[in-house]
Amino acid sequence: MDALRQDRTVSIGLLILRLGVGGYLLTHGLGKLRMLLAGNFEQMGDPIGLGPVLSLILVAVAEVLCALLVMLGLATRLAALLVVISMSVAAFVAHGSDPWTMEKGYMLFMSGVSKSWASKEPALLYLISFLALVFTGAGIFSLDALIWPRWRAHRAQREGDRVR
């Protein structure tokens, strides 16, 4: 497969990944945006000691604004990195004592051992997906590729110089 065709094929895969996980994270974050707009800060919690107001603002930015940016392919690596940080806090701090899988959370809830069926699994799935985008970028079907073509050409030339 020639390089141009492979680049397009990979970029189609990245577009599907960006739209899929970005769309799901966006819908996941809309509830937090509603909490923020309604001033329901006390429902958020304070997982790393920043206070519930700042915590809710940061989570809403990561889950709504950054999800939109990733879907558009605009500042993709930066936006994805902010989501990775947010999901790391969610998985390992906010849900630190929760089980790793939703199945285990469900089993603990149904047996009466736990008051909820929360788990690390959703946060980890977002974390892994967005971490991949930190390393790959958005691909050619993105606003990043439209806005910074000169930067991309310069980067490609620089990488070509390194190979020689």
Image (spheres, rainbow, N blue to C red):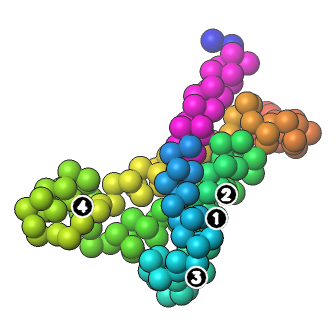
Determine the residue positioned at 33% across, 54% down. Answer: 121
Q: Is residue 65 placed above or below 73 in the rendered structure? A: below
Q: Quadrant of residue 108?
A: bottom left
Amino acid type, mark 1: Val
The CA span between labels 3 and 2 is 17 Å
Q: Is residue 82 placed above or below 16 in the rendered structure? A: below
Q: Secondary structure at mark 3?
A: helix
Pointer 3 or 2: first along the chain: 3
Q: Quadrant of residue 8?
A: top right
Amino acid type, mark 3: Val
Badge 2 is on which residue? 65
Determine the residue positioned at 87% across, 41% down. Answer: 147
Badge 1 is on which residue? 61
Marks 1,4: beta carbons within 8 A: no
Determine the residue positioned at 55% across, 57% down. Answer: 30
Marks 2,1: beta carbons within 8 A: yes
Residue 96 shows up from this direction? yes
Magenta-highlighted residues: 3-22
Badge 4 is on which residue? 117
The CA span between labels 1 and 4 is 25 Å
Q: How many marks?
A: 4
Where's residue 134, x and y in %? 61, 50
Determine the residue positioned at 70% across, 50% down. Answer: 69
